[in-house]
Image (cartoon, coloured by chain):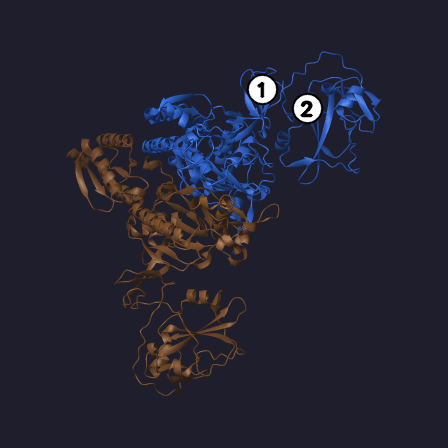
Chain colours: A blue, B brown
Amino acid sequence: MKLEKLVGDRFKERPSDCQTDSHALMVRGGYMKYVANGIYSSYMPLRRITRKIEQIIREEMDRIDGQEVQFPVAMPASLWEESGRYTSVGKELLRFTDRNGSQMVLGMTHEEAAVQLVRDYGQSYGKYPFMIYQIQTKFRDEARPRAGLIRVREFTMKDGYSFHTSQEDLEQYYAKCHKAYENIFRRTGVPEVISVLSDSGMMGGNISHEFMLLTPIGEDSIAICQECGYSANMEAAECLYDNRDNSEAEALTKKATPNVKSIEEVCGFLGSSAEKSCKAVVYQKNEDDAYVIVFLRGDLDVNETKLRNFVGGELHPAIITEESGICAGFIGPVGLNVKATVLYDRSLQGQKNLICGANEVDAHYMGFCPERDADVKEYGDFAKIADGGICPICKKHAIKVSRGIEVGNIFQLGTKYTKTMGMTYLDENGESHYPIMGCYGIGVGRLAASICEAHHDDYGPIWPMPIAPWQVHICAVRADDAEVKKTADELYEKLENMGAEVMYDDRDVSAGVMFSDADLLGIPVRAVVSPRNLKENCCEISARDKSFSIKVPVNEAAEKIMELIKELMEKYN
Amino acid sequence: MKLEKLVGDRFKERPSDCQTDSHALMVRGGYMKYVANGIYSSYMPLRRITRKIEQIIREEMDRIDGQEVQFPVAMPASLWEESGRYTSVGKELLRFTDRNGSQMVLGMTHEEAAVQLVRDYGQSYGKYPFMIYQIQTKFRDEARPRAGLIRVREFTMKDGYSFHTSQEDLEQYYAKCHKAYENIFRRTGVPEVISVLSDSGMMGGNISHEFMLLTPIGEDSIAICQECGYSANMEAAECLYDNRDNSEAEALTKKATPNVKSIEEVCGFLGSSAEKSCKAVVYQKNEDDAYVIVFLRGDLDVNETKLRNFVGGELHPAIITEESGICAGFIGPVGLNVKATVLYDRSLQGQKNLICGANEVDAHYMGFCPERDADVKEYGDFAKIADGGICPICKKHAIKVSRGIEVGNIFQLGTKYTKTMGMTYLDENGESHYPIMGCYGIGVGRLAASICEAHHDDYGPIWPMPIAPWQVHICAVRADDAEVKKTADELYEKLENMGAEVMYDDRDVSAGVMFSDADLLGIPVRAVVSPRNLKENCCEISARDKSFSIKVPVNEAAEKIMELIKELMEKYN
């Protein structure tokens, strides 16, 4: 099509409300427009990109026997009441009332709808396994939408649900789907996406993986072992410690620590380090405001996901009242006499001679030995893994924490939904069982934005060929020159007839404007027809990623371009 | 794919809650599942059909330079406040509040979103004309969902919006789009769809057309001239009358009409007919309950759409109170002394010697001559056209009223939305104008159901090749027979390799079950491999619509099937 007719504005200035490059470039390039907080409209270039991504996803899902279906966006609350999520999920689940007063929700995920669709069908073991998926609009009422399409409230998602009669069968299919996801990310141009173990969160179930594109703007922290390649979301990464300590246990001694506040100050004041201290972090359960005190090594942070999973409910940082008897700033295991759940992190196990609070103002203990001085029933894993931490697989101190965007996830759900929603099947012996489920998601718009985040320069996105909005961009520089116009027109027509997806810029604008618009559209192959090139009877063919720039005789240009398109397409096969 | 793995149940019994054949067959055939009132999930066969319909629509929209975009499903109420529709549209517009207390709506149509998307872009005349469209989920909180996918609350729709700098340009594009719609209906297998003039309703604007599939289960009434082909939605069809009356005007005479109620009874009692009477129908304005009395010929019905458009607001049938002074059952133009808007339908113009109420209980007049006896300022067009009515184009008594399903519509919107939402452009002379809009809709699911309604038999849908869920259905009758299984397996593999979309039934079930399942899936070409056929080294290839049934040597079957698929595809080109 002609660029002149492309609806949408392109401009130079980075919008002030865009924190990430992909967001700024996709606004500047006429890909998307803000409608409301976390809600955008897409212009044609973005819609073409998302449609190509959707098609790649569809092909890979079909290849692993996925059956494309469609669930409703608006669902009756009763469906979510069956699974218990109508009450257990927070405000992200948008609830509303229809004209007849019925309670409804907007779908943010479709486990309930999937079970409802196949509950009658899947009554006999012979029907299993099967997988159904959809590609559709979802709504999640996020508190803090951010970074353009990275975290929005309304988005298009591919969500799939598989049903199995055994854990082994689920695991086999899960592995197939993991492979399909690798194919999807490779084919959409981001083979660098890695899969990491994750915490399943509100989805329930056990094993789950997130597919992460590593980038500093990512919202997630990922622990990666530099030695063996182990990787996990920091929320899920197990922490190990090597606390062998052959030093002599010293006596527990109370010290006055007036006017020293932070853990570092206390340790400095007492001539020790944060690693040789035991700090307390206090939470309250959302349910009843009961206190939860976590003791862990002074240099570590609490991993609230692990803590939440252990406690079995939501938590918030504590507001410590006087009545609680908790002596904020000086909490320690020795002589702690308060109403609270007290937990010990495994970073303290085997430690000796630590500094800890003395449960009175301006006082700390030295020489604290957990095993000797505290009544520790068990140690748990409540800390965040950090750079240099021990890899839970190869046991080397080789963990590095990076940031990443989650572009997909897969979960082994188990029977959480089939049990609550009463879906059963009869096995060979006529016995009734609950099917075991897996679920598999990819956010289409987020993937598009992530690809842009991973592949751009200062001037615009650099779209990989398989998802580029168009394949080749013709710039007729000086289209007012009859020879240029004729040559470019012919090239355009020829390429269109050969089946290429062509963006054709024959506007009467400067080369500068033309090229900066082309940069913003990020089309992988560019063909420039200009008076200067025509003097040599050539046109210039170059790559948006600057990997090549060649001069080709005018009458060979179309064939050469088709060849390049094919090459750049196959690169991702 | 193998039928054995197709998720969804097929069954024989017509579900009791299905009023229409298409609904019953699409439930029986495993196409869709009820989730909530007017809300369904789609199984794979329906999703494949809707995707093919979507692709045909997309191709035709792209061919008339439509640019595919995407608007949000959830929109801020403020957008609808700009156009005034937040208050003017009734409960069909689903309104809700998000977690931050912002008022939102679910999109039932996207004029506002379209203007918002291009308001900044379209500031110069040089950018015009352009058309943007999307294919997406919509929600309309219908009071009475019915007939399966014909009238639902959640549905997928293609909606397009064009922008122009002159009415002539809009009309040109409108004609192009009309042609594109004809292409779409032909290509999806329902070339019999006709376009009819319609009332624009809440969309605003003037000229509009509805595309109607004529079927007795349709919700709409369409007036079609059997002579000249004129057609219009009954809501919009203009009524003409030939009231030349050379008879002598009789004296106005009051008659007692005790215990005669209906218009027919009164006329019978007074020795006349409904056509020679003047009846009154009373409404109240929703706004202030003010009365509106319409006088029209006794054999006609009021067209409430015309009346609403004339009055400029919503109306409801009147509740006649004693205080109103209206003498229900005996209302007539003579001596009518009540507070009401009094309207005369043009069916009364030129009439003589009619029967009418006398505004007192049990009394009517005979000999009523509107021009002589009533103070008629003007006659309006307030009646429904009926069979035998006069065609407004060719003026012959050739109107026939049929039922139809509206499968698409196109509107000339004018400047209603650009004006209210402040979208302007500068012309060649630097003068500011409001762009003129057109809008163009097709409901995808409704079209699928309509095609089924138009093309089915007692045993299932008969899908036209271009939108059929699969192209060929192989039945391996007696798949336990090794020869049958081998032949059918090979045919399946060969056809898949040749690029056909194949449904393969190799279940160990009776031929009866196999064929009734095949009928329910409605795939246009069927290939039967059976021991009987194999004796002749043949397989039987037949059409779902019974138009052919041939025996073909096994080794020629695949080629023959590919040929048939091509033929049946091209039939709709």
Counting other residues with Cα less than 10 Å from the Cα at mark 2, is it few (<14), some (14-19), or many (20 or more)?
Answer: some
> Is any atom of residue B282 visible in this view?
yes
Q: Is B473 or A516 nearer to us in this picture?
A: A516
Would you place residue B557 above or below residue A349 in this image? below
Dot 2 and dot 1 residues touching (CB under 8 Å): no
Q: Is A392 or B298 nearer to us in this picture?
A: B298
Q: Name the residue located 39 percent from the left edge and 83 percent from the top edge.
A: B372
Chain ID, mark 1: A
Q: Residue B25 at x, y = what percent?
A: 33, 49
- Secondary structure beneath dot 1 equals loop
Q: Is B472 or B113 nearer to us in this picture?
A: B113
Label of residue A392 in the image: 1
| Amino acid beneath label 1 | Pro
Would you place residue A124 above or below residue B104 in this image? above
Label of residue A300 in the image: 2
Query: In screen coordinates, is B544 left or right of B337?
Result: left
Q: Name the residue located 50 percent from the left edge and 73 percent from the top edge.
A: B291
Q: Between marks 2 and 1, how big is the CA–CA gap?
A: 17 Å
Q: Name the residue located 33 percent from the left edge and 36 percent from the top edge.
A: B4
| Amino acid beneath label 2 | Leu
Q: Residue A351 at x, y = what percent?
A: 71, 18
N-terminal of the pair, mark 2 or mark 1, is 2
**Which mark lies nearer to you, 2 or 1?**
2
